[in-house]
Image (cartoon, rainbow, N blue to C red):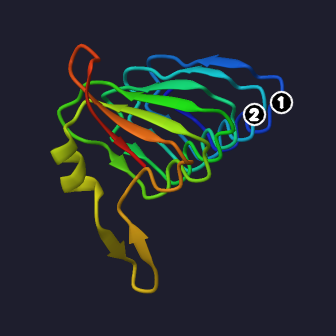
Amino acid sequence: ITNIPENAFSRCTKLSGVSLPESLTLLDATCFAWCASLKEVYLPKNLKAIYTFVFDSCPLTNVVIPASVVELRERSFGSMPNTLTVTFENREELPEIHRNAFQYSNTVIFRVPWTKEQHEAKFTGEYSNGSTIYSRDPFFGAGEGSVIQFIDEQGNIIEEMFK
C-alpha cells in the first residue's frame, strides 16, 4: 500500500487508533476526516504528503510528523478539538506547510527542529492569489495559547514563540 485514497475511512466513528504501513507515501484528502474516536495515529517514516482535511476534526492529542514529509496541505490537522502536540522530526529541509493546515484547531504545541530565524525566514509575511491576501504563518488558525517550541536534536527546548 502506497496511499490511502480519498474518503477511505472518513466518518468511521469507532476507529480509535491507526498504525500505517511503512510503504505508505501519501494520505489523500479526507481519508481519516471526522473520525470522532481517532485519538492515536502512527505516521510511517516514508510518508511524503498529508493532503487536505486528512485528520480534520479528529480528537488526536499527539502526532509525530516524519522527516520524510515535505507537505502538509490545507486543514490536514484542522478543527482539532483537544490540545494537540505536533512534533516535527529532525530534517534537512523545512516542509511546505500550507497556510491553514491547523485552522480552527484548539491549542497546538508545535515542536520544531529548526531555529526561530529559519522559521521567520520561511513562515512570515503575506502573499496574494490576486483577490485575497493570505498569511504565510502555517500556524494561522491554531487556537489561543498555541506555542512553537524550537528544539535541539535531543528534544530540548531552545526557545519558544507564543501565538
- Give the amino acid at mark 1: Thr
What secondary structure is marked by label 2? loop
Residue placed furthest toward the right: 13
159 on left or right of 64: left
**Is residue 100 positioned above or below 160 on the image?**
below
Name the secondary structure under disc 1: loop
Labelled pair 1, 2 in contact (Cβ < 8 Å): yes
Q: Residues within 10 Å of mark 2 (few under 14, many from 20)?
A: many
Q: Is residue 14 above or below residue 29?
A: above
Tell me the residue that label 2 is attached to: 35
Is 124 left, or right, of 141 in this rendering?
A: left
Tell me which label, 1 or 2, sits earlier in the chain: 1
* Residue located beneath label 1 in the image: 13
Q: Position of residue 118 (x, y in %)?
A: 18, 46
Q: Position of residue 141 (x, y in %)?
A: 53, 55
Q: Residue at x 79, y 38 (%)?
A: 11
Q: Residue drawn 67% across and 17% down?
A: 17
